[in-house]
Amino acid sequence: MSEQETKSIALFFFLAFLDDKKGVELSQKVAKRLKRIWSADASVDHALSLVSECFNTWTQALASKGQIIGSLVASEETLKLPQNVGLEAWKKFLQLEHRDNVFPLIWTEVLGYSEEVVGQATKISQCTIRTRIARGLAHLGSHCSLEKAHA
């Protein structure tokens, strides 16, 4: 597994839950599963299987808690951030945004994976993925605007 693949998994789970402990736990689970899959079949598309495994693990984590995505967000970041850097807009976004929009937004806009890969991994049409990304970006932008207004 490449360093970039490992970083993508870890960053996704941190951004999805804003909890580094949960992020590490789920990242290790996915990495272990992917190593098994990739060693068993060298022809497996790494990007597609990586996004797919993260999607399945994320969905299971949400379902196991029986909660909406925002209620899983840590009240305070467990990682130290530089002074004057906050995640308030992102926290608000996670708390209010429909989970269907969160996953594709992180994988395409933050991690740089293609809409096609995300669509195939989640078994959702590329058009629907684009719509969800656009909605997510609009909602995230509104939270950023509110944060600036209150600053």
Image (cartoon, helix red, strand yellow):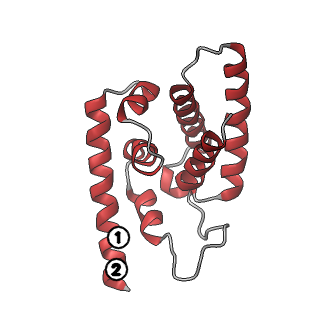
CA neighbours of label 1 inside 10 A, class few (<14), some (14 to 19), many (20+): some
Residue 51 place in picture, x, y as percent: 52, 33
Instruction: State the residue in front, 66 or 111.
Output: 111
Residue 7, horizontal then vertical, whole percent: 62, 47
Q: Circle 2 — which element?
A: helix
Q: What amino acid is at disc 2?
A: Lys
Position of residue 38 relative to residue 150, above or below, is: above
Q: Quadrant of the C terminus?
A: bottom left
Q: Is residue 18 left or right of residue 117?
A: right
Q: Position of residue 97 (x, y in %)?
A: 38, 54
85 above or below 1?
A: below
Q: Residue at x 49, y 49 (%)?
A: 68
Q: Quadrant of residue 99?
A: top left
Residue at 58%, 30% (x, y): give it.
Answer: 53
Q: Quadrant of the N terminus?
A: top right
Task: State the residue position of label 1.
Answer: 144
**Residue with the mark numbered 2:** 148
Q: Are marks 2 and 1 in contact (CB under 8 Å)?
A: yes
Residue lying at 68% horizontally and 20% vertically, measured from the top left: 37
Q: CA distance from mark 2 to mark 1?
A: 6 Å
- Left or right? Give the position of 42 relative to 103: right
Q: Quadrant of residue 122?
A: top left
Comparing 137 with 73, the one in front is 137
Which mark identifies residue 32? none
Image mark count? 2
Callout 2 environment at 10 Å: few (<14), some (14 to 19), or many (20+)? Answer: few
Q: Position of residue 103 (x, y in %)?
A: 45, 43
User: Image point 72% across, 19% down: which residue?
Assistant: 39
Amino acid type at circle 1 is Cys
In the image, 118 versus 123, the foreground residue is: 118
SS under mark 1: helix
